[in-house]
Image (cartoon, coloured by chain):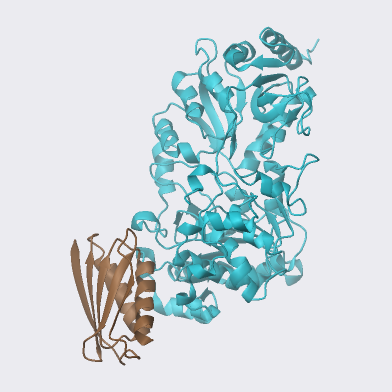
Chain colours: A brown, B cyan
Amino acid sequence: MESLTFRHTTKTPLPGSVPSAITGVVASGNLEILLERVLPTDVCEVAIETPIAGYGDVWEAVVADFVARAQPGGLRISINDGGARPDTVSLRLLQGARLMEA
Amino acid sequence: MTEWRREKLAREARIEAGRVHAAGKVVPAGTAVALLEAVLRPGDRVCLEGDNQKQADCLARALSACDPETIHDLHMVQSGIVLPEHLDVFETGIAKRLDYSYSGPQGARIAKMLYGGQIQLGAVHTYLELFARYFVDLTPNVALIAGVSADRDGNLYTGPNTEDTPTVVEATAFKNGVVIAQVNEIVDKVPRVDIPGDRIDFVVEADTPFYVEPLFTRDPAAMTETQILIAMMAIKGIYAEYGIRRLNHGIGFGTAAIELLLPTYGEKLGLKGKIATHWALNPHPTLIPAIESGWVKQIHCFGSEVGMDRYIRARPDVFFTGADGSLRSNRAFCQTAGLYACDMFIGATLQIDLMGHSSTITQSRVAGFGGAPNMGSDPHGRRHPSDAWMKAGREGEIVGDPALMRGRKLVVQLVETFGDKLVPTFVERLDALELAKTIGLELAPVMIYADDVTHIVTEEGIANLLLCRNADEREQAIRGVAGYTEVGRGRDRAKVEALRARGVIRRPEDLGIEPLDADRALLAAKSIKDLVHWSGGLYEPPARFRNW
């Protein structure tokens, strides 16, 4: 098990007012994401629990791209990973952000 | 005086020796070993029919039970190494040399045996290439083939899986060879004559029906959003862009997803009748919704697929069928159709390097080629134009007189950036090179060479390699769609953005596709059961796919 945390500053807060959302499932090759609107509006923090160690730089790149694209200011995002591939992680993060914007 | 009939006389001697074990041409399964020991000679070139799907398994068991003292050092020339018996004969010394095409199911064991020197390998071929050599320098002395039924004169009904049989028989029977067919039953009259009886010397009534491998069934329930996103990009960015009507699909989940999106996403884009109308393809169950929705004009098949027979019988306007109503497939003709009459091949692979060379070889498995290198190559002998072919030709034209320009076949690699267990699809160096060195192959087993590939589609975007003007652009175009693999993260961001500005790389948003719209709700069928419903109950999936 490896724990990773990435903290980013965003240009804007994530639109919408949904306080929290969950998407995805904990399953092999998949992941569960909890999103909570609990941080200052220009901050996003992503905390990851993954069973596969050694992919820190990939996670860092995936999270950075997600933050640049979605500008998820105000969100604390907790990821419970089941060995998902990076493209699945990206997709779930974007799906989560969309749920929070609703 | 020169003797011009040596082969003919040798053939007659073999037939005479075999007749001892036959009633007319008919031999019971229990006597098959004795028949083979009577007919075969040490060092013979033997084609033991192992196709992509249909297997002469009864004769394979008989051959592996022959006495290696009597029958040894055979040179096997067959397209598929599929059954364990196909390799057992090399362990016992019955066979020594091998020329073949495809070894998917035996990929790990054949790698070990090649490495251990138990097999003297001639070459790993494409199907058409091996078939061609049957008529030049690999003509079989004896062919052991499979059919559904035969009459007592040897007239053979192959059933829907005709596959390689006509080619194998043509090369053997007309060049003084002996043809032995195993059939599921001996009948008074065959439903149709696929091979005339005067080309068949012996008919073995098999103890069990021959084995058929269901290779082309992809369960829609296992399709992921990533595969759907890739399929959406391919449809909009390639099929619609080039107006692809004549095509061949590989067997992966990505192309199966495309098949299932035609009646939904394709319909929404107004593409019905404009793309994907004429096919060189096995009867993929996932194509049923598109056929039922009127997308597909016709399909010629390499072989059949388990469970599709009743459906095909009911759709003779779409499929090639015989007077008996069942499918007539033919691998050699369909490969030729895929090579010369299709404007696009689209399929998956396991590894792509920085130039676009691709391979399905991993360090411990030798899967062979099958037909992909023929489907996935630009045939320089093509001389008929089509809009798609000419457009690709214009895009790829760098220098030269435009009046002498020729078209290009589209060869599209559809891959996810990571495969199973987070194994990256994009690599600096193909494992195939290491394997070639390890087992001493003169030619590295490359599935599709870089200069044949026109597009690579991943979940990150489409790289149009036709538009790349030098090796550096090509490498950055590939890195630019390689996602979070090391190759992808090693990109020059500025160069990749410049390529995107020129349309060499296109992202989902450049194509007007929202990745979050890539939803399983878009699939015309979400399960095998849905496919059965679409077929009006005519599709009969094999047991392992019935999970309801």
Asked which quadrant contains residue B14, the reply is top right
Which residue is pictured at 78% across the width and 24% down the height? B197
Q: Is residue B217 left or right of residue A34?
A: right
Which residue is pictured at 66% across the width and 39% down the height? B161
Along the line of sight, the residue nearer the viewer: A14 or B373: A14
Q: Is residue B341 left or right of residue B371?
A: right
Q: Eyeballing the image, is B190 above or below B544?
A: above
Give how far across and how far down residue B41 sits, in percent.
61, 14
Q: Eyeballing the image, is A13 above or below B461?
A: below
Is residue B171 visible from the viewing direction of this image?
yes
Q: Eyeballing the image, is B431 above or below B6?
A: below
Along the line of sight, the residue nearer the viewer: B349 or B447: B349
- Furthest toward the top, the residue is B20
Q: Eyeballing the image, is B10 above or below A61?
A: above
Give how far across and how far down residue B155 sits, in percent.
77, 26
Along the line of sight, the residue nearer the viewer: B431 or B368: B368
Tell me the quadrant of the picture where the N terminus of chain B can be found: top right
Give how far across and how far down residue B146 sits, in percent.
64, 29
Asked which quadrant contains residue A52, the reply is bottom left
Asked which quadrant contains residue A101, the reply is bottom left
Q: Is residue B434 left or right of residue B60?
A: left
Which residue is pictured at 50% across the width and 13% down the height? B68
Q: How many marks?
A: 0
Is residue B490 visible from the viewing direction of this image?
no
